[in-house]
Protein backbone atom coordinates (compact mmCIF):
# COMPACT_ATOMS: atom_id res chain seq x y z
CA UNK A 1 0.00 0.00 0.00
CA UNK A 2 1.49 3.29 -1.16
CA UNK A 3 1.84 6.25 1.20
CA UNK A 4 0.84 4.16 4.17
CA UNK A 5 2.48 3.12 7.38
CA UNK A 6 2.51 -0.60 8.18
CA UNK A 7 1.18 -1.21 11.69
CA UNK A 8 1.28 -4.99 11.97
CA UNK A 9 -0.68 -8.07 11.05
CA UNK A 10 -3.02 -10.65 12.50
CA UNK A 11 -4.23 -13.89 10.94
CA UNK A 12 -2.26 -13.03 7.81
CA UNK A 13 -4.02 -9.69 7.37
CA UNK A 14 -1.78 -6.63 7.30
CA UNK A 15 -2.95 -3.34 8.76
CA UNK A 16 -1.88 -0.01 7.27
CA UNK A 17 -2.56 3.56 8.23
CA UNK A 18 -2.82 6.12 5.42
CA UNK A 19 -0.62 9.22 5.59
CA UNK A 20 -3.67 11.53 5.45
CA UNK A 21 -4.39 10.30 8.96
CA UNK A 22 -1.64 12.64 10.15
CA UNK A 23 -3.64 15.53 8.65
CA UNK A 24 -6.52 14.63 10.94
CA UNK A 25 -4.27 14.82 14.00
CA UNK A 26 -2.74 18.04 12.69
CA UNK A 27 -6.22 19.50 12.16
CA UNK A 28 -7.17 18.63 15.76
CA UNK A 29 -4.03 20.32 17.07
CA UNK A 30 -4.50 23.47 14.95
CA UNK A 31 -8.22 23.78 15.68
CA UNK A 32 -7.67 23.30 19.42
CA UNK A 33 -4.76 25.73 19.57
CA UNK A 34 -6.73 28.41 17.74
CA UNK A 35 -9.67 28.05 20.11
CA UNK A 36 -7.29 28.31 23.08
CA UNK A 37 -7.83 24.77 24.35
CA UNK A 38 -5.27 23.74 27.01
CA UNK A 39 -2.60 21.34 25.74
CA UNK A 40 -3.70 18.60 28.12
CA UNK A 41 -7.23 18.63 26.68
CA UNK A 42 -5.84 18.42 23.15
CA UNK A 43 -3.83 15.43 24.33
CA UNK A 44 -6.98 13.70 25.58
CA UNK A 45 -8.71 14.38 22.25
CA UNK A 46 -5.83 12.85 20.30
CA UNK A 47 -5.74 9.82 22.59
CA UNK A 48 -9.48 9.48 22.13
CA UNK A 49 -9.16 9.58 18.32
CA UNK A 50 -6.45 6.91 18.47
CA UNK A 51 -8.63 4.71 20.70
CA UNK A 52 -11.57 5.11 18.31
CA UNK A 53 -9.39 4.06 15.41
CA UNK A 54 -8.28 1.00 17.38
CA UNK A 55 -11.98 0.16 17.65
CA UNK A 56 -12.30 0.76 13.90
CA UNK A 57 -9.46 -1.75 13.31
CA UNK A 58 -11.34 -4.29 15.45
CA UNK A 59 -14.50 -3.54 13.44
CA UNK A 60 -12.66 -4.25 10.19
CA UNK A 61 -11.24 -7.47 11.63
CA UNK A 62 -14.84 -8.43 12.37
CA UNK A 63 -15.49 -8.33 8.62
CA UNK A 64 -12.16 -9.83 7.60
CA UNK A 65 -12.16 -12.78 9.99
CA UNK A 66 -15.79 -13.64 9.18
CA UNK A 67 -14.94 -13.53 5.45
CA UNK A 68 -11.98 -15.81 6.17
CA UNK A 69 -14.42 -18.37 7.55
CA UNK A 70 -15.96 -18.51 4.07
CA UNK A 71 -12.60 -18.87 2.38
CA UNK A 72 -12.35 -15.21 1.34
CA UNK A 73 -9.00 -13.62 2.12
CA UNK A 74 -8.47 -9.97 2.91
CA UNK A 75 -5.67 -8.17 1.07
CA UNK A 76 -5.22 -5.64 3.85
CA UNK A 77 -6.96 -3.31 6.24
CA UNK A 78 -6.33 0.37 5.68
CA UNK A 79 -7.18 3.20 8.04
CA UNK A 80 -8.24 6.49 6.49
CA UNK A 81 -9.34 9.63 8.35
CA UNK A 82 -12.92 8.87 7.33
CA UNK A 83 -12.79 5.31 8.63
CA UNK A 84 -11.37 1.87 7.98
CA UNK A 85 -11.50 -0.33 4.94
CA UNK A 86 -10.98 -4.08 4.84
CA UNK A 87 -10.05 -4.85 1.24
CA UNK A 88 -11.50 -8.27 0.66
CA UNK A 89 -10.18 -10.19 -2.34
CA UNK A 90 -13.74 -10.70 -3.44
CA UNK A 91 -17.16 -10.21 -1.93
CA UNK A 92 -19.24 -13.11 -0.71
CA UNK A 93 -21.96 -13.77 -3.28
CA UNK A 94 -24.15 -15.96 -1.15
CA UNK A 95 -26.59 -13.52 0.54
CA UNK A 96 -26.35 -15.43 3.82
CA UNK A 97 -22.56 -15.08 3.85
CA UNK A 98 -22.70 -11.43 2.77
CA UNK A 99 -25.18 -10.72 5.56
CA UNK A 100 -22.90 -12.26 8.20
CA UNK A 101 -19.74 -10.58 6.89
CA UNK A 102 -21.50 -7.17 6.78
CA UNK A 103 -23.01 -7.50 10.26
CA UNK A 104 -19.78 -8.70 11.88
CA UNK A 105 -18.19 -5.23 11.85
CA UNK A 106 -20.95 -3.26 13.61
CA UNK A 107 -21.41 -6.23 15.94
CA UNK A 108 -17.82 -5.76 17.18
CA UNK A 109 -18.66 -2.14 18.08
CA UNK A 110 -21.83 -3.23 19.82
CA UNK A 111 -19.90 -5.78 21.89
CA UNK A 112 -17.28 -3.13 22.75
CA UNK A 113 -20.07 -0.75 23.77
CA UNK A 114 -21.63 -3.36 26.06
CA UNK A 115 -18.27 -4.39 27.49
CA UNK A 116 -17.25 -0.81 28.26
CA UNK A 117 -20.69 -0.09 29.72
CA UNK A 118 -20.48 -3.07 32.06
CA UNK A 119 -16.96 -2.09 33.15
CA UNK A 120 -18.06 1.52 33.74
CA UNK A 121 -21.05 0.32 35.74
CA UNK A 122 -19.09 -2.01 38.00
CA UNK A 123 -16.13 0.28 38.53
CA UNK A 124 -18.43 2.80 40.14
CA UNK A 125 -18.42 5.33 37.33
CA UNK A 126 -19.63 8.75 38.42
CA UNK A 127 -22.62 9.23 36.14
CA UNK A 128 -22.88 12.86 37.24
CA UNK A 129 -20.14 13.45 34.68
CA UNK A 130 -22.84 13.03 32.06
CA UNK A 131 -24.36 16.36 33.04
CA UNK A 132 -21.47 18.35 31.64
CA UNK A 133 -19.55 15.90 29.44
CA UNK A 134 -15.91 16.87 29.07
CA UNK A 135 -13.23 14.64 27.65
CA UNK A 136 -10.60 13.79 30.26
CA UNK A 137 -8.99 10.87 32.07
CA UNK A 138 -12.10 9.90 33.97
CA UNK A 139 -14.64 10.29 31.19
CA UNK A 140 -12.70 8.93 28.24
CA UNK A 141 -14.06 5.37 28.61
CA UNK A 142 -17.59 6.69 28.71
CA UNK A 143 -16.90 8.65 25.52
CA UNK A 144 -15.40 5.54 23.96
CA UNK A 145 -18.46 3.47 24.89
CA UNK A 146 -20.73 6.07 23.26
CA UNK A 147 -18.48 6.27 20.20
CA UNK A 148 -18.76 2.51 19.71
CA UNK A 149 -22.53 2.70 19.96
CA UNK A 150 -22.50 5.50 17.41
CA UNK A 151 -20.16 3.54 15.10
CA UNK A 152 -22.46 0.52 15.19
CA UNK A 153 -25.55 2.59 14.39
CA UNK A 154 -23.88 4.80 11.77
CA UNK A 155 -22.42 1.83 9.90
CA UNK A 156 -25.79 0.14 9.86
CA UNK A 157 -27.44 3.01 7.97
CA UNK A 158 -28.51 1.66 4.57
CA UNK A 159 -25.85 3.66 2.75
CA UNK A 160 -24.43 1.13 0.30
CA UNK A 161 -21.51 0.30 0.09
CA UNK A 162 -21.40 0.87 3.86
CA UNK A 163 -22.24 -2.13 6.05
CA UNK A 164 -25.94 -1.30 6.41
CA UNK A 165 -26.19 -1.01 2.62
CA UNK A 166 -24.61 -4.44 2.25
CA UNK A 167 -27.08 -5.84 4.75
CA UNK A 168 -29.87 -4.33 2.62
CA UNK A 169 -28.42 -5.82 -0.57
CA UNK A 170 -28.08 -9.23 1.05
CA UNK A 171 -31.66 -9.14 2.35
CA UNK A 172 -32.98 -8.08 -1.07
CA UNK A 173 -30.89 -10.80 -2.73
CA UNK A 174 -32.96 -13.44 -0.96
CA UNK A 175 -35.96 -12.22 -2.98
CA UNK A 176 -34.51 -11.04 -6.31
CA UNK A 177 -31.49 -11.32 -8.61
CA UNK A 178 -28.27 -9.90 -7.19
CA UNK A 179 -27.94 -7.22 -9.87
CA UNK A 180 -31.42 -5.86 -9.14
CA UNK A 181 -30.74 -5.96 -5.38
CA UNK A 182 -27.45 -4.09 -5.93
CA UNK A 183 -29.17 -1.44 -8.04
CA UNK A 184 -31.78 -0.80 -5.34
CA UNK A 185 -29.20 -0.79 -2.53
CA UNK A 186 -26.90 1.42 -4.64
CA UNK A 187 -29.71 3.92 -5.32
CA UNK A 188 -30.62 4.05 -1.64
CA UNK A 189 -26.94 4.50 -0.82
CA UNK A 190 -26.65 7.45 -3.20
CA UNK A 191 -29.69 9.16 -1.70
CA UNK A 192 -28.17 8.67 1.76
CA UNK A 193 -24.86 10.01 0.45
CA UNK A 194 -26.53 13.20 -0.79
CA UNK A 195 -28.16 13.63 2.63
CA UNK A 196 -24.75 13.15 4.29
CA UNK A 197 -23.17 15.80 2.07
CA UNK A 198 -26.03 18.22 2.65
CA UNK A 199 -26.03 17.67 6.42
CA UNK A 200 -22.24 17.69 6.53
CA UNK A 201 -21.99 21.05 4.76
CA UNK A 202 -23.59 22.71 7.76
CA UNK A 203 -22.23 20.52 10.51
CA UNK A 204 -19.23 18.36 9.77
CA UNK A 205 -16.79 18.50 6.81
CA UNK A 206 -15.81 14.88 7.45
CA UNK A 207 -19.38 13.84 6.68
CA UNK A 208 -19.16 15.60 3.30
CA UNK A 209 -16.12 13.48 2.45
CA UNK A 210 -17.85 10.32 3.62
CA UNK A 211 -20.89 11.25 1.50
CA UNK A 212 -18.81 11.72 -1.65
CA UNK A 213 -16.95 8.49 -0.94
CA UNK A 214 -20.25 6.59 -0.58
CA UNK A 215 -21.80 8.17 -3.68
CA UNK A 216 -18.89 7.19 -5.92
CA UNK A 217 -18.44 3.83 -4.21
CA UNK A 218 -22.08 2.91 -4.76
CA UNK A 219 -21.86 3.78 -8.47
CA UNK A 220 -18.65 1.82 -8.95
CA UNK A 221 -19.96 -1.25 -7.23
CA UNK A 222 -23.28 -1.28 -9.09
CA UNK A 223 -21.36 -1.14 -12.39
CA UNK A 224 -18.99 -3.84 -11.25
CA UNK A 225 -21.80 -6.15 -10.19
CA UNK A 226 -23.58 -5.60 -13.50
CA UNK A 227 -20.45 -6.32 -15.49
CA UNK A 228 -19.77 -9.39 -13.39
CA UNK A 229 -23.26 -10.75 -13.97
CA UNK A 230 -23.07 -10.13 -17.72
CA UNK A 231 -19.70 -11.82 -18.03
CA UNK A 232 -20.59 -14.77 -15.84
CA UNK A 233 -20.58 -18.03 -17.76
CA UNK A 234 -18.71 -16.60 -20.77
CA UNK A 235 -15.21 -17.50 -21.82
CA UNK A 236 -12.58 -15.70 -23.89
CA UNK A 237 -13.73 -17.62 -26.96
CA UNK A 238 -17.16 -15.95 -26.82
CA UNK A 239 -15.75 -12.47 -27.35
CA UNK A 240 -12.90 -13.56 -29.61
CA UNK A 241 -12.10 -11.49 -32.70
CA UNK A 242 -10.99 -13.78 -35.48
CA UNK A 243 -10.61 -10.91 -37.97
CA UNK A 244 -7.86 -8.47 -37.12
CA UNK A 245 -5.31 -6.33 -38.95
CA UNK A 246 -1.86 -7.79 -39.36
CA UNK A 247 1.54 -6.22 -40.02
CA UNK A 248 4.82 -7.90 -40.92
CA UNK A 249 7.54 -7.34 -38.33
CA UNK A 250 10.06 -6.10 -40.87
CA UNK A 251 7.82 -3.63 -42.73
CA UNK A 252 8.57 0.07 -42.31
CA UNK A 253 6.52 2.00 -39.74
CA UNK A 254 4.96 3.95 -42.63
CA UNK A 255 2.99 0.80 -43.48
CA UNK A 256 1.44 0.87 -39.99
CA UNK A 257 0.65 4.58 -40.34
CA UNK A 258 -1.16 3.92 -43.62
CA UNK A 259 -3.20 1.12 -42.09
CA UNK A 260 -3.99 3.21 -39.03
CA UNK A 261 -5.34 6.07 -41.16
CA UNK A 262 -7.10 3.71 -43.53
CA UNK A 263 -9.44 2.05 -41.00
CA UNK A 264 -10.83 1.92 -37.48
CA UNK A 265 -8.25 -0.43 -36.03
CA UNK A 266 -6.10 0.90 -33.20
CA UNK A 267 -4.11 -2.28 -32.55
CA UNK A 268 -2.26 -4.52 -34.97
CA UNK A 269 -0.92 -8.02 -34.63
CA UNK A 270 2.71 -8.08 -35.69
CA UNK A 271 3.67 -11.35 -37.37
CA UNK A 272 6.89 -13.07 -38.30
CA UNK A 273 6.59 -16.05 -40.64
CA UNK A 274 2.86 -16.32 -39.97
CA UNK A 275 3.12 -16.46 -36.20
CA UNK A 276 2.42 -13.46 -33.97
CA UNK A 277 5.36 -11.87 -32.19
CA UNK A 278 3.65 -8.91 -30.59
CA UNK A 279 1.11 -6.12 -30.66
CA UNK A 280 1.57 -2.68 -32.15
CA UNK A 281 -0.72 -0.04 -30.69
CA UNK A 282 -1.69 3.39 -32.00
CA UNK A 283 0.33 4.90 -29.14
CA UNK A 284 3.34 2.82 -30.20
CA UNK A 285 3.04 4.09 -33.79
CA UNK A 286 2.81 7.72 -32.69
CA UNK A 287 5.71 7.27 -30.30
CA UNK A 288 7.81 5.73 -33.07
CA UNK A 289 7.07 8.67 -35.40
CA UNK A 290 7.95 11.18 -32.71
CA UNK A 291 11.15 9.54 -31.51
CA UNK A 292 12.42 8.15 -34.79
CA UNK A 293 10.99 8.10 -38.30
CA UNK A 294 8.46 6.41 -40.55
CA UNK A 295 11.28 4.41 -42.09
CA UNK A 296 12.24 2.33 -39.03
CA UNK A 297 11.06 -1.25 -38.97
CA UNK A 298 7.79 -2.01 -37.15
CA UNK A 299 9.56 -4.49 -34.89
CA UNK A 300 11.30 -1.59 -33.10
CA UNK A 301 8.07 -0.14 -31.68
CA UNK A 302 6.14 -3.37 -31.15
CA UNK A 303 5.20 -4.61 -27.70
CA UNK A 304 6.97 -7.96 -27.82
CA UNK A 305 5.55 -9.12 -24.47
CA UNK A 306 1.88 -9.34 -25.37
CA UNK A 307 -0.62 -10.84 -22.97
CA UNK A 308 -1.48 -14.39 -24.05
CA UNK A 309 -4.78 -15.96 -23.05
CA UNK A 310 -6.28 -19.43 -23.39
CA UNK A 311 -9.59 -19.55 -25.24
CA UNK A 312 -11.29 -21.35 -22.33
CA UNK A 313 -10.35 -18.75 -19.70
CA UNK A 314 -13.43 -17.14 -18.10
CA UNK A 315 -14.01 -13.74 -19.71
CA UNK A 316 -14.06 -11.96 -16.37
CA UNK A 317 -10.63 -13.37 -15.48
CA UNK A 318 -9.36 -12.20 -18.86
CA UNK A 319 -10.60 -8.66 -18.25
CA UNK A 320 -8.95 -8.61 -14.84
CA UNK A 321 -5.63 -9.77 -16.32
CA UNK A 322 -5.83 -7.13 -19.05
CA UNK A 323 -6.54 -4.43 -16.48
CA UNK A 324 -3.75 -5.64 -14.18
CA UNK A 325 -1.18 -5.64 -17.01
CA UNK A 326 -2.63 -2.51 -18.60
CA UNK A 327 -3.14 -4.17 -22.00
CA UNK A 328 -5.98 -3.21 -24.30
CA UNK A 329 -5.49 -6.24 -26.54
CA UNK A 330 -4.45 -9.83 -25.86
CA UNK A 331 -3.50 -12.74 -28.12
CA UNK A 332 -5.75 -15.78 -27.81
CA UNK A 333 -4.53 -19.35 -28.09
CA UNK A 334 -6.22 -22.72 -28.37
CA UNK A 335 -3.91 -25.57 -27.46
CA UNK A 336 -0.78 -23.54 -28.37
CA UNK A 337 -2.32 -22.36 -31.65
CA UNK A 338 -2.89 -18.68 -32.17
CA UNK A 339 -6.52 -18.16 -33.22
CA UNK A 340 -7.37 -14.50 -32.71
CA UNK A 341 -7.35 -11.53 -30.39
CA UNK A 342 -9.34 -10.22 -27.47
CA UNK A 343 -9.95 -6.48 -27.49
CA UNK A 344 -11.19 -4.53 -24.45
CA UNK A 345 -13.43 -2.43 -26.66
CA UNK A 346 -14.86 -5.56 -28.18
CA UNK A 347 -15.66 -6.89 -24.71
CA UNK A 348 -17.55 -3.66 -23.98
CA UNK A 349 -19.53 -4.19 -27.18
CA UNK A 350 -20.14 -7.77 -26.18
CA UNK A 351 -21.53 -6.61 -22.83
CA UNK A 352 -23.73 -3.99 -24.52
CA UNK A 353 -25.17 -6.57 -26.91
CA UNK A 354 -25.82 -9.09 -24.14
CA UNK A 355 -27.40 -6.32 -22.07
CA UNK A 356 -29.71 -5.35 -24.96
CA UNK A 357 -30.76 -8.96 -25.50
CA UNK A 358 -31.55 -9.66 -21.83
CA UNK A 359 -33.69 -6.53 -21.65
ZN1 LIG B 1 -17.79 -2.13 8.42
Image (cartoon, rainbow, N blue to C red):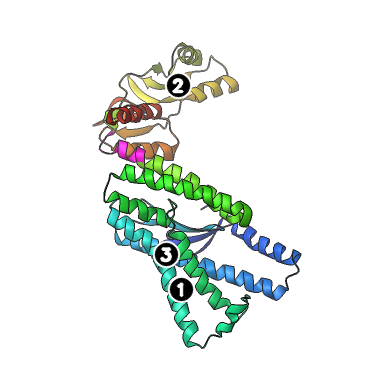
Give the number of the mark in front: 1 or 2: 1
Q: Name the residue under label 2.
A: 266
Q: How far apart are marks 1 and 3 (CA)?
A: 11 Å
Q: How crowded is mark 2: few (under 14 residues within 10 Å), some or many (20 or more)?
A: some
Q: Is residue 227 left or right of residue 159?
A: left
Among the 4 quarters of the image, the one containing residue 88: bottom left
In the image, the residue with mark 2 has its CB under 8 Å from the nearest atom of ligand 1: no
Q: Mark 3 points at which residue?
A: 106
Q: How far apart are marks 3 and 2 (CA)?
A: 49 Å
Q: Can residue 71 be seen in this view?
A: no
Q: Name the residue under label 1.
A: 113
228 drawn magenta: yes
Rendered location of residue 292, percent (x, y): 58, 20
Q: Looking at the image, which is closer to me, 106 or 241?
A: 106
| Secondary structure under the numbered disc 2 in the rendered image | loop
Instruction: Work out whether mark 1 precedes mark 3 in sequence or the reverse, and give the earlier one.
Output: 3
Q: Residue 99 carries which label?
A: none
Quarter of the displayed picture in which ligand 1 can be seen: bottom left
Q: Looking at the image, which is closer to me, 240 or 51?
A: 51
Q: Looking at the image, which is closer to me, 111 or 262?
A: 111
Asked whether the beta carbons under mark 1 and mark 2 sit within 8 Å of each other, the answer is no
Residue 305 drawn above or below residue 221: above
Rendered location of residue 83, percent (x, y): 52, 59
Magenta region, residue range: 226-235
Q: Residues within 10 Å of mark 3 (few under 14, many from 20)?
A: many
Residue 162 drawn above or below residue 260: below
Amino acid sequence: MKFSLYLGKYSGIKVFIHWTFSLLILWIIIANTRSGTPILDTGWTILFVILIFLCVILHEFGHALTAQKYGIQTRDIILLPIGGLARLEKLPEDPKEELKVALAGPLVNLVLFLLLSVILFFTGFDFNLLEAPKLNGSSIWLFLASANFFLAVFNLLPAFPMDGGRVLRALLSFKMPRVKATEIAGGTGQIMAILFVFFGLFNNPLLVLIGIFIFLGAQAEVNQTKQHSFLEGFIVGDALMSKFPVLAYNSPLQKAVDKLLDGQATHFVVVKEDSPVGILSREGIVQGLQDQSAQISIEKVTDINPLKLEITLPLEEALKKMAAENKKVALVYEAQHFIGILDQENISEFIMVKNAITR
